[in-house]
Image (cartoon, rainbow, N blue to C red):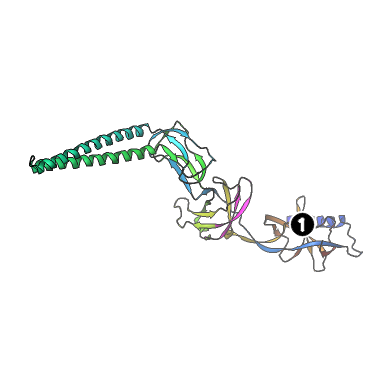
């Protein structure tokens, strides 16, 4: 019963539109020049969206290898940095003290080694003069060798202390952008604790989690579309890789997508992804063919006599200049694109503007 009421209402609206157009059934058909298009089956991307954050493939967490208080940060989030640029300083007072002690120890070891070498030369001459025994000479040689070993050990200790001291200054390992500041100056930094994150904005990717059963339908190189949450833009891309191992808890697989270089796309942005692997086929018409009057949607179709015929339809999503015709059209019909306001049912159609 409801279907009959809806059909009667739709026919009444069509009749009203026809009457309001001033169409005269008895007179000759008025000819109107129009642009024509086709109602045809097209592939539309699935409405399934998968959300992820854009990240750099080249991401480095800057951390210290020593425990100390963070003295200063030389950069802020969003700053571009160059390789070798000083980023932060950590209190290295203990390391500096150890370095000075190691330096003093090396000097003492060098003096001792030099003295032992001179004594050894003197004992060698005395041995030639038979003033000392071979055993005394061998003892002196052993002492000189031990002094030399102590000097080498002290040199290695100084080098290690210098390395530890260098951990107090943190430099950028590559060109990039500071995307995150983890702690503020004054806080205690531990070995391995991230202080800053530096990312390369020219090497971006998007990672999303896809249910395992659907991820099997996605292949590397297949097309996808990324929708940026910040400004609503969309960019075409391809799948870089599908990680074959699924998470045993979430039952999802990671899909990595390439992100083309584009002004305004930066690490940290959230984006939605639609995969072409999940596309579905719909009857579609050019977006300009759709007419809306309140809740009523319609389109003018060129019938087999070349006349305008009004069809009531139900539309779906729009994509790439086309809109889904969910009902009212079977596909293959010729439709009027951007119909002029004076166009009414029954008028003769001629292509051209």
Residue at horizontal 83%, vertical 64%? 349
Residue at horizontal 24%, vertical 35%? 111
Task: Specify whether 141 is left or right of 165.
Answer: left
- What residue is shown with label 1? 298
Crowding near the residue tagged with mark 1, few <14, some 14–19, many ≥20 C-alpha atoms within 10 Å: many
Q: Nearer the viewer, residue 322 or 196?
A: 196
Residue at horizontal 44%, vertical 35%? 89
Residue 271's x, y, as percent? 58, 48
Q: How many marks?
A: 1
Task: Specify whether 141 is left or right of 345.
Answer: left
Whether 322 is drawn above or below 78: the answer is below
- From where the camera sits, is residue 301 visible? yes
Q: Within the image, what quadrant is residue 297 found in?
A: bottom right
Q: Residue furthest right?
A: 27
Residue at horizontal 87%, vertical 54%? 20
Which quadrant of the figure contains the N terminus?
bottom right
Question: What is the span of residues highlighted in magenta in the rendered image?
Answer: 220-238
Residue 288's x, y, as percent? 75, 56
């Amino acid at each position: 019963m409801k279907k009959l009421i809806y059909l009667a209402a739709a026919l009444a609206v069509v009749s009203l539109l026809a009457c309001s157009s001033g169409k005269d059934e008895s007179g000759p058909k008025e000819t109107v020049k129009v642009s024509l298009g086709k109602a045809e089956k097209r592939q539309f991307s699935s409405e399934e969206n998968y959300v992820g954050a854009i990240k750099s493939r080249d991401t480095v967490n800057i951390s210290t290898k020593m425990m100390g208080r963070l003295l200063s940060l030389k950069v802020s989030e969003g700053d571009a940095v160059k390789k070798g640029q000083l980023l932060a300083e950590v209190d290295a007072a203990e390391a500096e003290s150890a370095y000075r002690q190691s330096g003093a120890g090396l000097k003492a070891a060098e003096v001792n080694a030099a003295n032992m070498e001179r004594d050894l030369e003197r004992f060698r001459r005395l041995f030639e003069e038979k003033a000392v025994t071979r055993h005394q000479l061998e003892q002196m040689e052993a002492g000189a060798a031990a002094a030399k070993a102590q000097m080498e050990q002290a040199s290695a200790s100084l080098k290690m202390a210098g390395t530890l001291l260098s951990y107090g200054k943190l430099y950028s390992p590559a060109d990039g952008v500071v995307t995150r500041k983890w702690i503020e100056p004054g806080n205690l930094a531990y070995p391995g604790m991230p202080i800053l994150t530096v990312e390369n904005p020219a090497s971006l990717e998007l990672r999303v989690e896809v249910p395992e059963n659907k991820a099997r339908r996605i292949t590397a190189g297949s097309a996808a579309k990324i929708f940026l949450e910040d400004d609503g833009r969309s960019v075409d891309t391809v799948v870089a890789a599908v990680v074959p191992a699924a998470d045993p808890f979430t039952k999802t697989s990671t899909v990595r997508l390439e992100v083309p270089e584009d002004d305004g796309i930066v690490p940290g942005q959230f984006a939605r992804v639609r995969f072409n692997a999940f596309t579905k086929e719909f009857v579609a018409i050019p977006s300009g063919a759709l007419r809306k009057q309140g809740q009523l949607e319609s389109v003018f179709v060129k019938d087999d006599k070349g006349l305008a015929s009004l069809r009531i339809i139900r539309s779906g999503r729009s994509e790439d200049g086309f809109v889904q015709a969910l009902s009212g059209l079977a596909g293959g019909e010729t439709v009027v694109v951007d119909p002029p306001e004076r166009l009414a049912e029954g008028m003769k159609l001629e292509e051209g503007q």
